[in-house]
Image: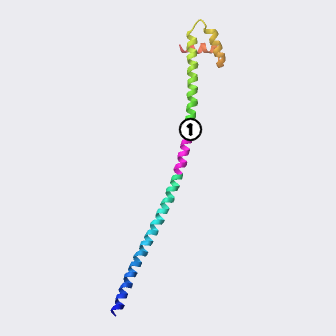
């Protein structure tokens, strides 16, 4: 009888240990599934952020291109204004040189003179 009782206790201890291990396995499987879902979400978010970054970089490059273009136009306009000011201040070659520059720009010297006179 004592042996039977000892075997029952061993059986109960083994069953308790088995239930404990099964519970641990179930918890680990749940943790693994949660981590897998989290990893999937992080990967999806990472791809979305990479696409957003690529789009923003493309827009930045477009803006930089436009900025450089506008900067070049402003530089050209500044050079033209400088030339016009130097020519208009030189009274001896005023009409001859100015007419050539204005013809190059597609303007008439007379319309420029009128605009200058109206400003003063």
Residue at (42%, 72%) from the top-left corner?
24
Q: Give 21 or 53, whichever is nearer the viewer.
A: 21
Q: How is the image coloured?
A: rainbow
Spot occupied by residue 64 in the image (x, y as percentages of width and height) = 55, 35
Q: Give 2 or 12, whichever is nearer the viewer.
A: 2
Residues packed near mark 1 inside 10 Å, few (<14), some (14 to 19) or many (20 plus): few
Q: Is residue 13 visible?
A: yes
Quadrant of res 20? bottom left
Residue 57 colored in magenta in the image: yes
Spot occupied by residue 103 in the image (x, y as percentages of width and height) = 66, 16
- When the figure is inspected, residue 15 is found, relative to residue 70, above or below; the finding is below
- When the figure is inspected, residue 28 is found, relative to residue 88, above or below; the finding is below
Residue at (49%, 56%) from the top-left corner?
42
Q: Is residue 117 visible?
A: no
Residue at (44%, 66%) from the top-left corner?
31
- Of all residues shown, which one is farthest toward the bottom? 1
Numbered marks: total: 1
Q: Is disc 1 placed on a helix, strand or loop?
A: helix
Spot occupied by residue 83 in the image (x, y as percentages of width and height) = 58, 16
Residue 4 colored in magenta in the image: no
Residue at (57%, 22%) from the top-left corner?
77
Viewport quadrant of the N terminus: bottom left
Spot occupied by residue 49 in the image (x, y as percentages of width and height) = 51, 50
Instruction: Give the main secondary structure of the magenta stretch.
Output: helix
- Of all residues shown, which one is farthest toward the left? 2
- Of all residues shown, which one is farthest toward the top? 92
In the displayed structure, does residue 86 sit left or right of residue 10? right
Read off the magenta span: 48-58
Task: Identify residue for label 1.
Answer: 61
Quadrant of res 65? top right
- Of all residues shown, which one is farthest toward the front? 3
């Amino acid at each position: 009888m004592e042996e039977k009782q000892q075997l029952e206790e061993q059986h109960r201890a083994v069953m308790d240990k088995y239930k404990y291990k099964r519970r641990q396995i179930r918890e680990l499987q749940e943790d693994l599934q949660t981590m897998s879902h989290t990893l999937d979400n992080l990967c999806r978010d990472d791809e979305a952020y990479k696409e957003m970054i690529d789009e923003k970089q493309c827009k930045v490059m477009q803006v930089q291109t436009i900025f450089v273009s506008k900067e070049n136009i402003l530089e050209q306009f500044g050079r033209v204004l400088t030339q016009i000011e130097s020519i208009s201040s030189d009274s001896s070659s005023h009409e001859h040189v100015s007419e050539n520059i204005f013809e190059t720009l597609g303007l008439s010297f007379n319309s420029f003179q009128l605009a200058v006179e109206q400003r003063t």
